[in-house]
Image (cartoon, rainbow, N blue to C red):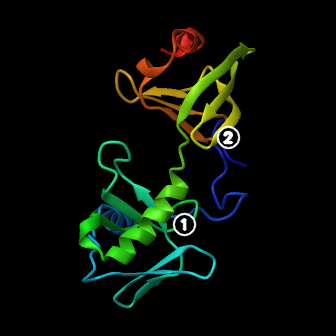
Amino acid sequence: MPPMGRPPRGPRPDGPEEEFNLEQMEKETEEMLKLRYLTKDNAVFERTEGGFVSVRIGEEFHPRVQVVRMFPFSDPDQYISIRTPDERSKEIGIIENMKQVSKETAEMLREQLALRYFTPIITKIINIKDEYGYAYFDVVTDRGACRFTINMGGHSVVHLSETRILISDIDENRFEIPDVTKLTTKELKKLDLFL
């Protein structure tokens, strides 16, 4: 019987202890920090049957990829990250500038980006009602009338500039007001809480 206060030695009841593998961790970190630039000379992008995009880089093939802007507001056509589509997505490579890929590839990637960054423009605010920590928006966008809800406590309203606002609803849909100075006084009063 072990002395009081000390846990018994031997294998843990939940199984053998997993050893910390420093070498494996260093290898994974090195891979993550590697930057690989993709151009028309080293990468071939193609549409898949399901409407997605695949990429082949030499012998390496990814049947489906995610297309992500690294600087979506300041440089939408530069530094496009190509990633694996899974939950723990890994970067496959970066397109430094859309001019470095073929016209067809750029068009295909822009289609994917348009889906990912779909952001209707709010052209008119009909009403905003806040209740129990949520704000309920009734607006008209460049895509038609829309109602959505935002969480008042989160970072749902982001000021991209002094006049430009990005609003994210509770379902992570994005809406934009490109210039608040173009809203009427009545609309601004409704939006006052977020300015």
Label 1: how many Cα within 10 Å (few below 14, some 14–19, many 20+):
some
Figure check: 163 above or below 6: above
Figure check: 64 above or below 181: below
Residue 124: x and y in percent read 58, 26
- The residue that appears at 34% across and 47% down in the rendered structure is 71
Inter-mark Cα distance, 2 to 1: 20 Å
> Which residue is more in the foreground, 38 or 144?
144
Figure quadrant of residue 127? top right
Cβ atoms under marks 2 and 1 closer than 8 Å: no
Residue 19: x and y in percent read 50, 64
Kind of residue sitting beneath label 2: Asp
Q: Can residue 65 be seen in the rendering of this structure? A: yes
> Which residue is more in the foreground, 188 or 98?
188
Q: Secondary structure at mark 2?
A: loop
Figure check: 13 above or below 149: below
Kind of residue sitting beneath label 1: Pro
Residue 28: x and y in percent read 38, 66
**26 relative position to 142: left or right:** left
Q: Secondary structure at mark 1?
A: loop
Q: Can residue 133 be seen in the rendering of this structure? A: no
**94 relative position to 166: left or right:** left
Q: Which residue is mark 2?
A: 171
Q: Which residue is mark 1?
A: 85
Label 2: how many Cα within 10 Å (few below 14, some 14–19, many 20+):
few
N-term-proximal mark, 2 vs 1 = 1
- The residue that appears at 39% across and 54% down in the rendered structure is 69
- The residue that appears at 61% across and 42% down in the rendered structure is 173
